[in-house]
Amino acid sequence: MPNDSSSNALGLQSAVDLLKMLASHEVSSVELLDHFVERNSSLHSQINAVVTLDVERARASATVSDNRRANGEAVGVIEGLPMTIKDAIAVEGIRSTGGAVELADHVPEQDADVVSKIKTAGGIVFGKTNLPRWSGDIQAYNDIFGATNNPWDLDCGPGGSSGGASAAVAVGLTPWEIGTDIGGSIRLPAHFAGVCGHKPSFGIVPQVGYIDHVSYGLTDADVNVFGPLARTVGDLELLFDVVNGPRRDTENGWRLDLPLARGDAKELRVASWLDDPDCPVSEDVSVVLEAAVSAIEADGVAVDRSARPEIAFNDVRRVGQPLISAATSPGRTEEELEALQEIISDPSADETLRMRAAASTMTHRDWLLLTEKRDRNRQLWSDFFTGFDVLLAPVAFVGAFEHQHEGTLYTRTLTVDGRVRPYSDLIVWTSQFGYVYLPSTVVPVGLTSGGVPVGIQVVGPYLGDRTTLEFARYVESLLGGYRVPPIAQI
């Protein structure tokens, strides 16, 4: 555990440490499962993070795992470790809804590819965590399960869309999680709940089994990725190594061999981009980020605070967010698409709403032309990372905020530092790097004056996942990383 943790609860130990305890027979898989279930029972009414349980089948799997260890049989790298999975990912035999009422009673007959990889490695899935409908919001709220609360402030949300995942990890209901991220849905919850998260480079973790619309199945959504959330960066990397690689239907033709980190953390060439007039960062968050970068500099790491790629910041609005809206359009109902068509033809409509409407209904030709712009920007990012190894950036312009269930991602507002801001600005700093397929690791770097967590993005070149994880591990060691929320100390 990070050195500022004050709890010795079994459920708050790192996954790496729990696996060591399993290997030494200090604890059994069944005992671990029962501990997580008991913690969930104690905290569920306050947090509402794990919304579906499959305890009996999990206990049977845990018993088999314990017997395997007792008999000295070969075991997987995460053998016997119980865990939960975001409800946007299909798990065989467990209700998996995508947060949508249309699938409220849906029980998949087949695991998503990442779940298969986890089970093959010995992991045991015992529950599903909360999210918004079709993973389309910066909160974990839907009409089936209600709202998940932030462990640091129950009046606030833990972010989204993998908000149930981040809350469950933060309070020790699970050692780690697999979430999804198309506009920031791993990174934002990590930031808001004070845990670690890794958004992999696009295309290196299979998406088969992603429940983002009713007829989900075999298609990999553009921009979207699956990735881990955990309490430590070491846990992130271990789970990332379990799930990355080819899809089942292509594994006979290729394998993934990611490059090693570009060097030890303190040898890496570091840039920072901590604010921008296009999406100003709140004073509370800025103070924490500036202190984090200053601490890195004081530890002997040179940080270039002015280096930037040759890309206009607001290309994220003109190119990135339209591509994300297009990628999420399969989840729109026919009625929603008709309403979007009306917005396009209404010159008085809000500019952001018109962008979303146009992007969700664009022609294939328009999408291809937008993709050309994205590919030019990808090349410019590649050029930037010839001179630097990692870029430090905010996750969001604000820390955890109070629940908002009325309206949508594009109609809500937040008042920050006396200024009314579009709620959709929450995904600007994450979309900035996601739509160009870059890896990003989030690690906690402190608390705001109001006592809620702040994370920082460590962004790297495409396929440079091990480099971002390497530097995030250093930042974690330097600044303490995950802290135990007071509510979790039970």
Image (spheres, rainbow, N blue to C red):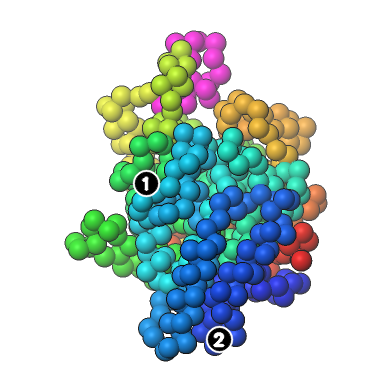
Image spot of residue 444 (x, y percent) = 64, 60
Q: Earlier in the sequence, mark 1 or mark 2?
A: 2
Residue 192 in sight from this viewpoint: no
Depicted 194 relative to depicted 60: above or below: above
The residues colored magenta run 343-360
Q: Nearer the viewer, residue 335 or 419?
A: 335
Q: Residue at x 35, y 53 (%)?
A: 110
Give the residue at x 33% y 44%.
Answer: 217
Type of the residue with mark 2: His
Residue 350 belongs to the span the image colors magenta = yes
Q: For the N terminus, give its image quadrant.
A: bottom right
Residue extending furthest toward the right = 449
Q: Is residue 372 visible?
A: yes
Q: Position of residue 68 (x, y in %)?
A: 43, 82
Identity, as a three-letter code, of the amino acid under mark 1: Arg
Number of residues whose C-alpha sits closer than 10 Å to that of mark 1, classed few (under 14), some (14–19) or many (20 or more): many
User: Could you tell me residue 63's position as x and y percent?
Assistant: 49, 75
- Residue placed under numbered mark 1 in the picture: 378
Q: What residue is drawn where x is 31% and y is 36%?
A: 372
Query: Residue 25 bears which disc, if any?
Result: 2
Element assignment for label 2:
loop
| Residue at the farthest left position | 253
Please give the label number shown on residue 264: none
Q: Is residue 35 left or right of residue 187?
A: right
Which part of the image, by quadrant, shows the C terminus?
A: bottom right
- The chief SS type of the magenta part is helix
Which marked residue is nearer to the observer: mark 1 or mark 2? 2
Frontmost residue, 23 versus 348: 23
Kindly report the distance in space between the C-alpha atoms of the residues bearing marks 1 and 2. 48 Å
